[in-house]
Image (spheres, rainbow, N blue to C red):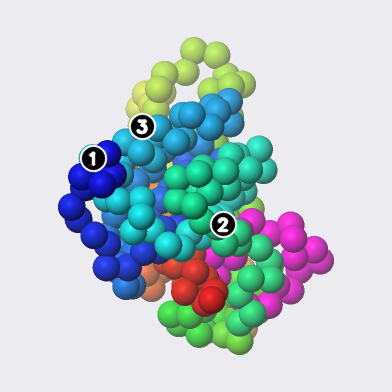
Amino acid sequence: MASKLNIRLLNNLLVIDVGNTDAGFGIFEDKTLTHQFRIKSLKDENYVFFEYSFRQYFLENNLRFSDITKVVLSSVVPPLTPIFKLLINNIFGIEPIIVNAYIFPSIEISIDNPNEIGSDLIANAVAAFTKYKRNCVVVDFGTALTFTVVSGTGKILGVSIAPGLKTAVKALFANTAQLPDVPLELPTSVLGKNTVHAIQAGILWGYEGLVKNMIQKVRAELEGDCIAIATGGLSSIISTLHGEFVEVNRELTLEGLRIIGESQA
């Protein structure tokens, strides 16, 4: 079936970011992200589910497996890592580049155990450092809300972690009876007039304060010299935060994985 497809990629780098909620995929032509898609990273799903999703996307977009000659894999879900490694081997006939704490020599991880840091956060740091080469805090709005601080010399100084927006909502639902579904939409007022509005106000406006306070404290520890970048699927939800960031880039992690892939022979 693949032999009938007629669009050839100019560049052949596939990057995969397996997170706790979704697995994100990006295909780069040169340095341009031309294709991307996401599937749920369901830990209960087996190999067949993920292979079918891959094959379906490539078929629908007239992409050929043979055009992919390099794959970079970041996974923070240990049970899914071997599944994706097997999938990459079987579909592309390639041994993937697995992101780890030592894969990008320009980045030094200055924490107690470098192997504890998530590979997605390493990718974020690589992208931020490569682009700005300044003290920077990358705020990733994902399943967890993470703050990764990287110095202008390429040293990851530390990480802070809080529950993500959706995680906070789910925790509230898990421990409170008879709450309705709540869309993640920033209300105009913090004075909730109904249950949905009250939850939106408490979580979204509360997280605005959390993020601003964390950025302020990071800057204080770095004596004021620190820019901030936002990434992650929910990075645009709290629009009032955008003035805090030099960039809001949902694809920052994929870009970091691209840079890591290009650095590998």
**40 is higher (above) or lower (below) than 71:** above
- Say which quadrant the C terminus sits in: bottom right
Residue with the most extreme front position? 3
Q: Amino acid at mark 3?
A: Pro
Tag nearer the camera, 2 or 3 = 2
Tag 1, which secondary structure?
Answer: helix
Tag nearer the camera, 3 or 1 = 1
Image point (56%, 57%), residue name: 95
**251 is higher (above) or lower (below) than 176:** below
Residue to which mark 1 is pinned: 60
Q: Earlier in the sequence, mark 2 or mark 3?
A: 2
Image point (51%, 36%), residue name: 41
Whether tag 1 and tag 2 are in contact, CB under 8 A, the answer is no
Tag 2, which secondary structure?
Answer: loop
Residue to which mark 3 is pinned: 183
Q: Which residues are magenta?
A: 107-128
* Left or right position of 195 against 136: left
